[in-house]
């Protein structure tokens, strides 16, 4: 079966999706920045609670989104806008790496190890919980989007 969309419709659809991801990214990045300021008012001072919280919450949310979409279905626009845009920009592997390195560089080897282990354990557990929560939604009515 061929796609009934012509090239102009595909371009508009692609641009709409790109705009959705960009807008979602702005929302997620601002939320991440706010959370970081709230939990770590001074960057690279002490334990990186902001990054740990953002990454764990992002794993939970992305798991829930994935679980929900697998049961109820979800339009690609919303899945990409929320998943790639909002959640993708809210979480931060690069800050995790930089903060772990910063802890090691400053001689906090035990704290760096604790941070790495907590990040992985909480991320996995949160993603698993999110998949369970999102996947438990019963299929009723229409799909999101």
Image (tube, grey):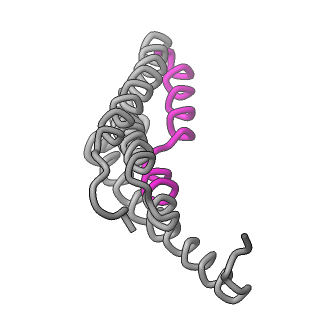
Residue depicted at x 28% and y 61% = 141
Residue depicted at x 50% and y 15% = 107
Question: Which is nearer the eye, 82 or 71?
Answer: 71
Pick out the residue farthest to the top: 110
Question: Which is nearer the eye, 2 or 65?
Answer: 2
Question: Which is nearer the eye, 36 or 67?
Answer: 67
In magenta stretch: residue 86: yes
Left/right of residue 32 with respect to residue 84 in the rendered view: left
Pick out the residue farthest to the bottom: 8
In magenta stretch: residue 103: yes
Return the x and y of residue 120 as percentages of the image width and height. Answer: 47, 23
Vertical placement of 103 versus 90: above or below? above
Residue depicted at x 51% and y 34% = 96
Residue depicted at x 55% and y 72% = 17
Which quadrant: the N terminus?
bottom right
Q: Is residue 45 visible?
A: no
- Identify the image quadrant of residue 64: top left
Vertical placement of 106 versus 9: above or below? above
Question: Which is nearer the eye, 43 or 122?
Answer: 122
Return the x and y of residue 112 as percentages of the image width and height. Answer: 48, 18
Q: Main secondary structure of the magenta part?
A: helix
Number of numbered callouts drawn: 0
Return the x and y of residue 116 as percentages of the image width and height. Answer: 48, 21
Q: Which residues are magenta?
A: 83-108
Left/right of residue 93 with respect to residue 46 in the rendered view: right
- Identify the image quadrant of residue 115: top left
Which quadrant: the C terminus?
bottom left
Q: Is residue 27 visible?
A: yes
Return the x and y of residue 131 as percentages of the image width and height. Answer: 39, 36
């Amino acid at each position: 079966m061929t796609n009934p969309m012509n090239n102009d419709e595909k371009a508009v659809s692609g641009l709409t999706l790109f705009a959705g991801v960009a807008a979602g990214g702005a929302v997620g990045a601002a939320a991440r920045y706010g959370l970081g300021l709230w939990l770590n008012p001074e960057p690279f001072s002490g334990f990186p609670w902001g990054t740990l919280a953002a990454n764990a919450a992002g794993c939970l949310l992305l798991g829930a989104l994935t679980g929900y979409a697998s049961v109820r279905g979800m339009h690609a626009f919303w899945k990409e806008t929320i998943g790639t845009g909002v959640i993708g920009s809210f979480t931060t592997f690069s800050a995790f790496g930089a903060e772990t390195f910063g802890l090691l560089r400053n001689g906090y080897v035990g704290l760096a190890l604790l941070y790495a282990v907590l990040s992985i354990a909480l991320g996995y557990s949160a993603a698993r919980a999110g998949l369970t929560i999102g996947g438990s939604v019963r299929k009723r009515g229409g799909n999101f989007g």
